């Protein structure tokens, strides 16, 4: 049974990497990335970049045209208390989202930032 849970964890970002239980979404928040513009997008994998460059917004309408956005999902495991953060970097285009990058931090890289919400 443990093997099946581990396999499921590989394909689901909302499963705890510690105990393989399904995690709850503790909160969601939308940010804009004013340093990332159309034609000047550079992929970043470092949590520090996002902690230093994300600006909180309440809706997509607050994001100027041509500026990238980032959706943050903060997960918490109800069984062991482990936390994880998923960042989804996208470009708002009309009524759609052009997905650029999906990042998953589960070693505490974004915990302080997420707790400051």
Image: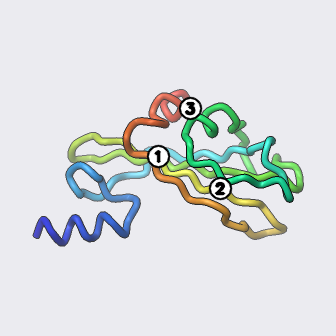
Quadrant position of residue 4: bottom left
Q: Residue at x 80, y 42 (%)?
A: 34
Vertical arrangement, residue 91 with respect to residue 67, above or below: below
Measure the alpha-carbon separation of dots 2 and 3: 18 Å
Mark 3 or 1: in front is 1
Q: Secondary structure at mark 2?
A: strand
Between 96 and 11, the one lying in front of the other is 11
Please name the residue that numbered disc 1 is placed on.
85
Of the residues under marks 2 and 3, which one precedes in the sequence? 2
Q: Quadrant of the C terminus?
A: top right
Of the residues under marks 3 and 1, which one precedes in the sequence? 1
Q: Residues within 10 Å of mark 3 (few under 14, many from 20)?
A: few
**Mark seen at residue 89:** 2
Camera sees residue 61: no
Q: Residues within 10 Å of mark 2 (few under 14, many from 20)?
A: many
Coordinates of residue 9 in the picture (x, y in percent): 30, 64
Q: Is residue 55 left or right of residue 23?
A: right
Please name the residue that numbered disc 3 is placed on.
117
Q: Quadrant of the N terminus?
A: bottom left
Q: Are marks 2 and 1 in contact (CB under 8 Å)?
A: no
Vertical arrangement, residue 95 with respect to residue 78, above or below: below
Camera sees residue 15: yes
Q: Secondary structure at mark 1?
A: strand
Coordinates of residue 29 in the picture (x, y in percent): 60, 45
Coordinates of residue 64 in the picture (x, y in percent): 87, 49
């Amino acid at each position: 049974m443990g093997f099946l849970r581990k396999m499921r964890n590989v394909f689901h970002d909302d499963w705890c990497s510690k105990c393989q239980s399904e995690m709850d979404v503790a909160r969601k928040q939308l940010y804009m990335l004013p340093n990332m513009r159309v034609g000047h997008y550079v992929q970043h994998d470092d949590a520090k970049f996002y902690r230093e460059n994300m600006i909180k917004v309440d809706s997509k309408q607050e994001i100027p045209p041509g500026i990238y956005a980032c959706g943050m999902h903060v997960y918490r495991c109800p069984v062991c208390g482990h936390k994880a953060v998923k960042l989804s970097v996208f470009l708002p285009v009309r009524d759609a989202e052009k997905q650029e990058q999906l990042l998953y931090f589960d070693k505490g890289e974004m915990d302080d930032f997420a707790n400051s919400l």
